[in-house]
Image (spheres, rainbow, N blue to C red):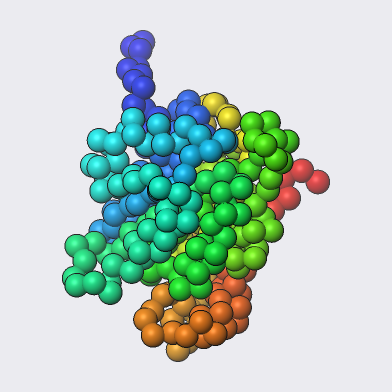
């Protein structure tokens, strides 16, 4: 018998099987996996991640900086935000690349992060961006770090009510493995519906380090049929009321159809 070679980079480079990683390292892995999924589908995409530190997402920027070279190899850029609102607005701009000349990529998948009180602070910027929408080959995730017990925050906080106010559908992973799988579903949901998609991650989830069964990047994602004559993704020239009507009448129902098509709401313990 020969001993397999194991390296610290396996958590990001290994394509299948099991690896040990923390949930915040899993966020880095998610970005890499989305790039790999797009490449396998024949899409040339770039990635963009930004946000503002604060417990329980305090050290996410450290994980991103530590893997800057690997992220660059996958055309993924990390740019920490000066504050939560400006970070959210820069994600909005990443969805608009088709409006400015001829972009070198088909789209930019983006991830914004902040602690729960930062989600509250950035609600207006997130809602405006969500009403404008996401690009067909872009997509945007809103990673909300929630500290229900005020373990390391001045106040106990949660983000569902703020995301609901911004018409942002919410996915709620319970483990690192959930995050890796739900994140890929989230980007596909964002592209299909034109909505920003929330990822609620509580302190207990973000503090995990565990052995994870990698979901891979080729598991099937069902796409509901498009609505004839309706473009759900962002486009120029829409008024505020037209944007709101599109969100309420078409984008949110498409999000519900996507969740049903992929069996995402499920009972794991009866």
From this view, report whether residue 113 is shown above or below residue 243.
above
- Asked if residue 22 lies left or right of residue 63, the reply is right
- Identify the residue at the far right of this view: 270
Image quarter (top left, top right, bottom left or bottom right) of the N terminus = top left
**Front residue (pair 42, 46):** 46
In percent of width and height, residue 83 lies at 45, 49
Residue 132 screen position, x and y as percent? 46, 73
> Which residue: 45% across, 89% down?
229
Give percent across and percent down for residue 162: 64, 59
Q: Nearer the viewer, residue 225 or 105?
A: 105
In this view of the protein, can residue 263 be seen by the observer? no
- Please, is residue 225 above or below residue 214 in the view? below
Number of disc labels: 0
Q: Identify the residue shown where x is 59% and y is 72%.
A: 252
Q: Which of the pair 178/168 is nearer the observer?
A: 168
Q: Which residue reaches farthest bottom?
A: 229
Q: Is residue 55 visible?
A: yes
Q: Is residue 164 left or right of residue 198?
A: right
Residue at image coords 73%, 36%: 149
Q: Is residue 218 above or below residue 245?
A: above
Q: Residue at x 47, y 85 (%)?
A: 239
Residue 168, picture quadrant:
bottom right
Please tell me whether residue 223 is drawn above or below residue 225 in the rendered image: above
């Amino acid at each position: 018998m020969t001993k397999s070679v194991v390296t610290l980079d396996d958590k990001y480079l290994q394509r299948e099987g099991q690896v040990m990683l923390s949930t915040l390292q899993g966020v880095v892995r998610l970005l890499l996996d989305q790039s790999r999924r797009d490449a396998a589908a024949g899409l040339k995409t770039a990635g963009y991640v930004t946000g503002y530190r604060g417990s329980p997402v305090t050290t996410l920027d450290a994980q991103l900086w530590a893997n800057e070279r690997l992220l660059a190899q996958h055309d993924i850029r990390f740019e920490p935000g000066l504050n939560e609102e400006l970070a959210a607005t820069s994600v909005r701009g990443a969805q608009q690349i088709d409006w400015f000349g001829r972009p070198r990529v088909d789209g930019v998948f983006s991830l914004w992060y902040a602690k729960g009180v930062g989600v509250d602070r950035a609600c207006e910027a997130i809602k405006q961006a969500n009403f404008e929408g996401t690009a067909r080959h872009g997509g945007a995730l809103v990673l909300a770090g929630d500290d229900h017990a005020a373990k390391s925050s001045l106040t106990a906080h949660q983000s569902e009510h703020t995301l609901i106010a911004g018409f942002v559908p919410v996915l709620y992973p319970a483990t690192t493995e959930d995050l890796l799988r739900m994140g890929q579903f989230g980007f596909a949901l964002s592209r299909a519906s034109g909505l920003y998609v929330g990822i609620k991650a509580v302190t207990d989830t973000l503090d995990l380090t565990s052995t994870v069964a990698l979901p891979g990047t080729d598991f099937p994602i069902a796409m509901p049929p498009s609505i004839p004559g309706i473009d759900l993704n962002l486009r120029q020239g829409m008024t505020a009321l037209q944007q709101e009507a599109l969100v309420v009448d078409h984008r949110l129902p498409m999000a519900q159809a996507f969740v049903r098509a992929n069996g995402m709401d499920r009972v794991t313990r009866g």
